[in-house]
Image (cartoon, rainbow, N blue to C red):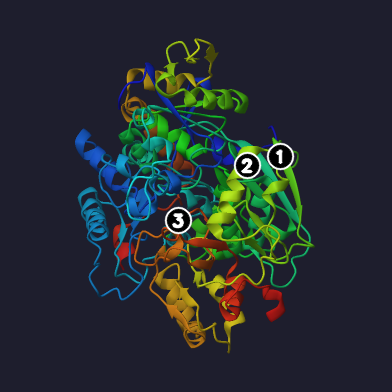
Amino acid sequence: MKARTLFDKLWDSHVVKQLPNGTALLYIDRHLIHEVTSPQAFDGLRLAGRKIHSPEAMMAVIDHNVPTTDRNQPIEEGESRHQIEVLEKNVKEFGVPFIPLKSERQGIVHVVGPEEGITLPGMTIVCGDSHTSTHGAFGSLAFGIGTSEVEHVMATQTLLQKPAKNLKINIEGNLKPGVSAKDIILAVIGKIGTAGGTEYVIEFIGSVVRNLDMAGRMTLCNMAIEAGARAGIIAPDEVTFEYVKGRPFSPKGKDFDEAVVYWKSLASDEGAYYDKIIEINVNNLEPMVTWGTSPEDVISIQGKVPDPENLKDESQRKRKKRMLDYMDLKAGQPIAGTKIDAVFIGSCTNSRIEDFRAAAHILKGQKIADHIWGLAVPGSGLVKKQAESEGLDKIFKDAGFEWRESGCSMCLAMNPDRLEPGQRCASTSNRNFEGRQGPGSRTHLVSPAMAAAAAIKGELTDVREMI
Amino acid sequence: MRKFDSLTAIAASLPEENIDTDKIIPARFLKTIKRSGLGKFAFYSWRYDDAGNERKDFVLNREPYRKAEILISYENFGCGSSREHAPWALLDFGIRCVIAPSFADIFYNNAFKNGILPIKLSREICEQLVEDTKMGANARITVDLVHQEITRPDGEKIEFEIDLLRRQLLLEGLDDIGQTMQYVHSIENFEKKRKEKQPWFPEIKIEKLLS
């Protein structure tokens, strides 16, 4: 048989029917939903008198809108409350498995799926959210879809798709202390650009990837979408199986052993064809930080803000100049030392227990600068509980952070956690777009350790000086 | 879904790369449970000042571009979030066609589902079309999906490529769920075979989530 990539195998094993022009009807194993991108899909089903094909393939959770303060208080913002109530009503009417807001298992959909063992290797997983790419860390084909496609999956358990091209990113070398998966993926996006992965599925491969824990792998795949890729994937291995084992929805006993045999067969074959291969060596990788309003505008913490005048293309030059203006930065200034107002540790990129451990390691016994608003938001109730059992909450609180309930929080400013216009934030989230953390907000994307270091110093700083 | 066959309309340009979906519609306007009425939020931070007044220097606030139905832009249009609110906002504003050198994957899919035609043309041609949009009331372009060609204001014709299946759905204004439903037997067969091959494949039980 022809040598195949991990993506080829995931694709082939889910084709229900081949249609003309290369389009295929692709079977979807898991459909995760949240309150923001599902109401119109439920409405569509209702209007057409359709049912959900397989509710037992679904999981619903509330994450985008929810305040991260006291869960016992009513949700003040009327539209948010309404959207949440509509989801609660819809899951009941259509029989969709749902984690209630007050459950300790509630959290960000991309944290909860893996945590529950709902995300498993070898699956196709979709959600009306671009960061669905996160689940690719398990060796699943996972990607974000729009609401019309959400409705399509609800009604048919399939999607009309064309195969993606294969892009291999081989990551080798030794990570230096203070450098993490977040820095790797920021560097990758800086190298290939926000459209560098368009039409591709990125397979992350190499010794560095194999040595990452699942949290790090999820961070890599989470931001594959910021490189424009349809998905990011990593072949499942012992680290994956160890993570998956014993989770509520993971197969048990003999079933698990059988599943592992299948999962082991998924790795790309020797000699499989990739449309493109990129080699990354991390030996000299430094902690990264974004300076502009696209994740590709990234430099080392030791770097200087690039000068747009050096760009040949006029529209590029104009755009980058506007970025500098928006970010209130000057070409040529060292990025370290840039004063910040807030620090956000959370989001589907970096809100797992490992992320809080990394930040707590820096924060232990320290205080954050007086002028800093520090926000620590666990990715799920279970992450929060675990952190508290390890005493991490105390480290954060003693340092001056607010320790919150789980949710998407200040990643996207559609809940009460947001910046004021002009405020600058070191953030562990995934997008530094204009206005992403609130109208006029300025975002610098960094790793959890870098965020903690910035909080202590009150400015962007090299975390390696604190370890 | 509204059909799309041929359209002659005012074209406006946003000649920039990487126009993201947060730019097309910021997250704080995603709290609706409807598809309609989002046009007033389209390009919010570009269209309105901090007090909520229209910025006169923004192209879509000026005549005749307020009535633009065709939008010309540059690489990676629609990058970022998967929100279908982006095409909903464009459609509600009146945009039926976006022309750019490249699109982000999810936005590209979402556009078709809403009767918006995204057309990929080279950067060079897009730059020429951007020039065409500066002609005020004469900035009229024809987009003909039947013959897969664009007619510039000076009458020059430009061909474009498009996937045949997507073209057919747009031309007929078809709901693709109905199309897929005809394969329900194939879907059920797939499920049956999977149960045989992977009996361990777990289902998500409501009770177990609530425990």
Name the spot of residue A467 as percent of width and height, x first. Answer: 70, 80
Label 1: which residue?
A312
Given the current orientation, which residue lies at the most extreme front position? Answer: B56
Precedes in sequence: disc 2 or disc 3: 2
What crowding class fits label 1: few (fewer than 14 Cα within 10 Å), some (14-19), or many (20 or more)?
few
Give the quarter of the image for residue B69. Answer: top left
Q: Nearer the viewer, mark 2 or mark 3?
A: 2
Work out how far the residue at label 1 is from the one at label 2, CA to CA, in angstroms.
8 Å
Work out how far the residue at label 2 is from the one at label 3, CA to CA, in angstroms.
20 Å
Q: Nearer the viewer, mark 3 or mark 1?
A: 1
Q: Can residue A182 be seen by looking at this rendering?
A: yes
Q: Chain of mark 2?
A: A
Q: Chain of mark 1?
A: A
Label 3: which residue?
A435
Q: Chain of mark 3?
A: A
Q: Are marks 1 and 2 in contact (CB under 8 Å)?
A: yes
Give the quarter of the image for residue B55. Answer: top left
Work out whether residue A104 or residue A327 is closer to the camera in this orientation and state it. A327
Q: Amino acid at mark 2?
A: Gln
Label 2: which residue?
A316
**Secondary structure of residue under mark 2:** helix
Q: Does mark 1 fall on the same chain as mark 3?
A: yes
Work out whether residue B81 or residue A123 is closer to the camera in this orientation and state it. B81
Q: Is residue B165 above or below residue A137?
A: above
Residue in the image at 47% along x and 34% along y: B108
Name the spot of residue A443 as percent of width and height, x first. Answer: 53, 62
Q: Can residue A148 be seen by looking at this rendering?
A: no
Work out how far the residue at label 3 is from the one at label 1, CA to CA, in angstroms.
27 Å
Name the spot of residue A298 as percent of width and height, x first. Answer: 65, 56
What crowding class fits label 3: few (fewer than 14 Cα within 10 Å), some (14-19), or many (20 or more)?
many
Work out whether residue A326 or residue A129 is closer to the camera in this orientation and state it. A326
